[in-house]
Amino acid sequence: MNWESEQKHEAKSMGGVSYVLRRVSYGRRAELVRMARELTGRVEFLEAAPEKKGPLEKLEANLLGNELEQLYVRWGLVRIEGLKIDGESATVEALIERGPEGLVREIAARVRHELGLTEEERKN
């Protein structure tokens, strides 16, 4: 058996674009959990009883959710193929900073899927 540590996916949100993700391993999952622990705890706190939260708390929860998505993309994305951003081949950082939001969200969702995390598990 040959284990490939990377896996290529065709982007659903953008034709002709593909991206390569690192496959989940025991050590890499532990690494991500350590990195995400603080963010998820803060998101959980801010999302609790949303009807009692003011606009600033809701904004903060949204911001932290976006930071968590960026963490998933930075952690899992190896490279992007078939996409240029401002005339240059897309990198992970360029995608996050200036790339199409839909593609960033698609990649973050794919990373979560590969991790086997449901919405409820991500909150815990």
Image (spheres, rainbow, N blue to C red):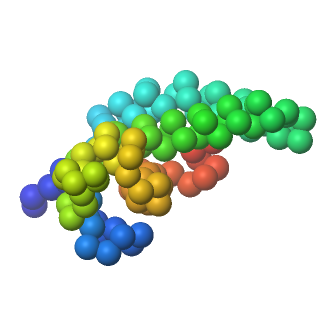
Q: Nearer the viewer, residue 59 or 30?
A: 59
Residue visible at 81% across and 35% down?
55
Please identify the quadrant where the C terminus is shown.
Answer: top right
Instruction: Point out the residue furthest to the front here.
Output: 86
Q: Residue placed at 28% from the left, 51% from the top?
A: 86
Q: Residue 106: x and y, percent? A: 44, 60
| Residue furthest out toward the left | 2
> Position of 45 compared to 50: left or right?
left
Whether residue 39 appears in this view of the structure is yes
Q: Is residue 14 above or below residue 47?
A: below
**Quadrant into which the N terminus falls:** bottom left
- Taking the spot 34% from the left edge, 48% from the top edge, the residue there is 95
For residue 116, say whether it is visible: no
Question: Residue 99: x percent and y percent?
Answer: 38, 52
- The spot of residue 35 in percent (x, y) is 43, 28
Q: Is residue 50 left or right of residue 67?
A: right
Question: x, y (%) of residue 41?
Answer: 62, 28
**Relative to the observer, which residue lies in front, 15 or 108?**
15
